[in-house]
Image: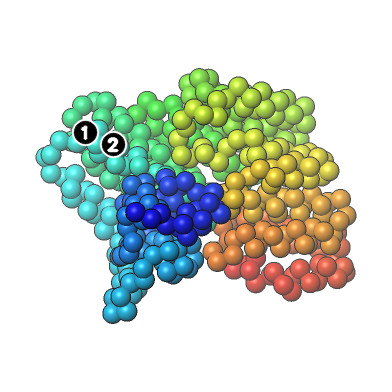
Amino acid sequence: MKKNAALGGRMAERGLTQDELAAQMNAALLEITGRLGDVSARTVRNLVSGATKRPIGRTRVALERVFGCPISDLGFVPPAATAPPEESVLRRSFCTATTGVVIGAVSKASGRRSVGTSDVIRLRDGMATLTALDQTRGGHAALERAALARAAEAVALQRNAVSQTVRQRLLSVAAHYTASAAWSCIDARQLDRARLHLSEALRMAGMAQDSTAQLRVWNSTAMLAHQRLEYSESVAASQAAQATTAARRNPLFSSLAHARTAIGHASCGDRQAALRSLGYAEAALARADPAAPSPAWISFYGPAELAALTAIVRELLHEPAHAEAASHQALASLSVRLRRNRSMTTVRLAASQLHQGEVEQACATTGDAFALMAGDPLPGRLRTMLGDFHRTLFTIAPSAQAAREWADHYRTQWSAS
């Protein structure tokens, strides 16, 4: 059996493991149909090994969406010419798919069958798909709907759980999915909906006695408060994250909570407290074991992301040179799959350059952010950052040719909803 070198090469170019490609294929199916796909690592293994030579149906569509090319370019036998266009067929079901997920989940759960650990595992496995979609495209309505549908399924299933342990695990899953929906709203700048989702996620995390879910909710609450300019609440929420059992036991979680606290203190103008919290975040991250298993939602966090958060702190403290250095450090090691995070760090780099009077360089730097997100709408947070950049640009250099060219070239992309 001959391996598929073309597919293997494309995966290597993007740094994708078999599990990561499966997650991205499932995310692609979510975008097309509104439903999470069921592609597994075994499916991908068969594709790479050559066991599957002619992928059909959803597998073909997902591959073409992820890599942006026909399957013939990926080393596969193309489908017969008479085959119907699968993506068109899938798209026709999009409008009813998301509501069908919720109705189907509740209908299945209304029966009296026992619900056990296999149901918990099945629902947990779907979280990686939403994480992959968020990291690639950012928060948007389809992601929010899919997360809420899975949360509703978990809540419905827990009514027939075989034990209290399974019931709590299903409530934990529901809390995490609801937190994913909240995060999608935060990233899309739908702040009122985000607050409602976070309140519900925290309630379910409490019933599940899941301190990791509680930490996740408090982390997002701190970000939401920052966006709403409620800086004291942001500090309080991040300190609540620090106080969770998960943060006390896991230095990776502790580091994230301290980094978020640093941003809150910097927003309040407390330089000493902000830098002290950054020091705690760095020390905790140094103790974290990079090989230890972690939930998919925190896979973005590590030295590169801490550098990106450090850039935010330095920017808020009006230290643009330090912010620029931290942004460069982050971009040097941020994973290419974290497309949205790289785009936002790039805009932050441009802002620090602009505050140092490097107008032409700053305008050129933002071009990389647009290129990174090419093909997808800009998430709300990124659009807001670009709006801030635009206003600062015309405050600092209103008559500069680079400023006028930036506005002419990027205004449409930046302002598109």
In the image, taking residue 286 as reference, residue 113 lies left or right, namely left
Mark 2: amino acid: Val
In the image, taking residue 242 as reference, residue 1 lies left or right, namely left
- Any mark on residue 320, and which? none
Tell me which residue sits at (74%, 70%) in the image: 407
Where residue 100 appears, as percent x and y from the top left, is 26, 58
Which quarter of the picture shows residue 284?
Answer: top right
Q: Name the quarter where the N terminus is drawn.
A: bottom left
Which quarter of the picture shows residue 116?
Answer: top left
Tell me which residue sits at (70%, 29%) in the image: 278
Q: Which residue occupies the foreground of this view, 126 or 192?
A: 126
161 over 229 or under it: above or below: above
Disc 2 and disc 1 in contact, CB within 8 angstroms? yes
Determine the CA span between mark 2 and mark 1: 7 Å
In the image, taking residue 5 as reference, residue 283 lies left or right, namely right
Q: Which residue occupies the foreground of this view, 69 or 156?
A: 69
385 over 307 or under it: above or below: below
- Any mark on residue 120, and which? 2
Q: Could you tell me which secondary element the residue under label 2 belongs to?
A: helix
Where residue 30 appears, as percent x and y from the top left, is 38, 58
Residue carrying label 1 = 116
Mark 1: amino acid: Gly
Tell me which residue sits at (59%, 65%) in the image: 374
